[in-house]
């Protein structure tokens, strides 16, 4: 992620040569801004011949992002329900545990729901995390209807007076139509009992522009309210967090940067852009 900062530091910013513009475009594409977004940023570089070019680019990127709240929407008066979606392999189940741990450390009582019932490994993994952070978890039988597990989890969370319910779901995108129907059913069943406050999409930060296409599928199906970008540790592809938010106009709320329970941070565009471009 330091390459963009190095680019700005190496020459007089009052004028950029055509060769430097080409280099800048390649750096933006390598950083997973995508070609269309990179070309829009490049137009600013072409037109701006001032010493504050770096600031102008950062300002333009910020203006292109979502203006929706970035904090998780947590109710103080009733059960808060968070639905976690995303493609298998993106770090979804681990992110459920990270969010649960983060909220528990803030003083909230948590219940987890293992609704990826067609993957025994996913249920086992989430159960292990639940034991580690000492929070209750609701599971169903193997191949059970995910919506029924979610429904039972809402009842259990209310009975136990949990403040937050986090529902882990399947992500078999190769079976897209069935998956979207399954997510829609979970959403309908849960909403009859308790409002869903957040529908978070987990985006693997190393998948590049394909991750944006995946996010669009989930957004069209259930209307995601926030994005969590994972696997950003040591990655040169930091632009993906900005590109996906610009494309969907859905805020990135959290970023994951490691495998530990505490390796999850609130997304702050100002500090993120500063780290990316300086």
Image (spheres, rainbow, N blue to C red):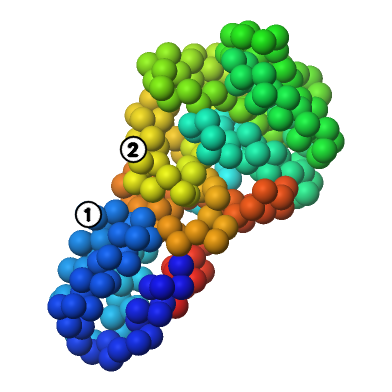
Q: How packed is label 2: few (under 14 Cα within 10 Å), some, or many (20 or more)?
A: few
Residue designated by label 2:
213
Closer-to-camera residue (71/27): 27
| In the rendered image, the vertical position of residue 172 relative to residue 14, given as above or below | above
Residue at numbered disc 1? 36
The relative height of residue 258 versus residue 271 in the rendered view (above or below) is above
| Sooner in the amino-acid sequence: mark 1 or mark 2 | 1
Where residue 110 appears, as percent x and y from the top left, is 75, 34
Seen from the viewer's position, the closer of residues 81 and 58 is: 58
The answer to whether the residue labelled 1 contacts the one labelled 2, judged by CB atoms less than 8 Å apart, is: no
What x and y, as percent, mark residue 207? 43, 45
Residue at (54% x, 35% y) in the render: 89
User: Can residue 104 be seen at all in this image of the molecule?
Assistant: yes
Q: Is residue 104 left or right of residue 94?
A: right
> Picture coordinates of residue 123 (x, y %)?
69, 23
Q: Is residue 44 visible?
A: no
Q: Residue at x 55, y 50 (%)?
A: 231
Query: Left of 25 or right of it: where is 251?
Result: right
């Amino acid at each position: 992620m330091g390459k963009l900062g190095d680019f700005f530091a190496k020459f007089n910013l009052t004028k950029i040569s055509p060769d430097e513009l080409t280099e800048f475009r390649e750096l933006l594409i390598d950083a997973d801004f995508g070609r269309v977004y990179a070309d829009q940023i490049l137009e600013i570089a072409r037109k701006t011949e001032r010493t504050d070019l770096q600031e102008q680019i950062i300002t333009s990127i910020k203006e292109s992002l979502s203006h929706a709240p970035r904090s998780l929407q947590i109710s103080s008066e009733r059960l808060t329900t968070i639905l976690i979606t995303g493609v298998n392999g993106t770090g979804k189940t681990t992110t459920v545990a990270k969010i649960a741990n983060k909220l528990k450390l803030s003083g909230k009582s948590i219940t987890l729901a293992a609704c990826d019932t067609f993957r025994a490994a996913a249920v086992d993994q989430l159960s292990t995390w639940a034991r580690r952070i000492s929070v209750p978890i609701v599971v169903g039988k193997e191949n059970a209807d995910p919506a029924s597990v979610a429904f039972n989890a809402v009842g259990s969370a209310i009975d136990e007076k949990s403040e937050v319910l986090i529902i882990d779901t399947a992500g078999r995108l190769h079976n897209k139509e069935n998956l979207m129907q399954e997510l829609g059913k979970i959403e309908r069943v849960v909403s009859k009992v308790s409002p869903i406050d957040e529908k978070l999409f987990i985006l693997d930060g190393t998948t590049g522009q394909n991750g944006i296409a995946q996010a669009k599928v989930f957004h069209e199906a259930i209307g995601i309210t926030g994005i969590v970008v994972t696997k950003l540790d040591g990655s040169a592809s930091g632009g993906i967090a900005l590109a996906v938010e610009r494309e969907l106009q859905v805020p990135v709320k959290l970023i994951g940067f490691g495998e530990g329970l505490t390796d999850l941070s609130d997304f702050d565009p100002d500090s993120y852009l500063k780290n990316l471009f300086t």
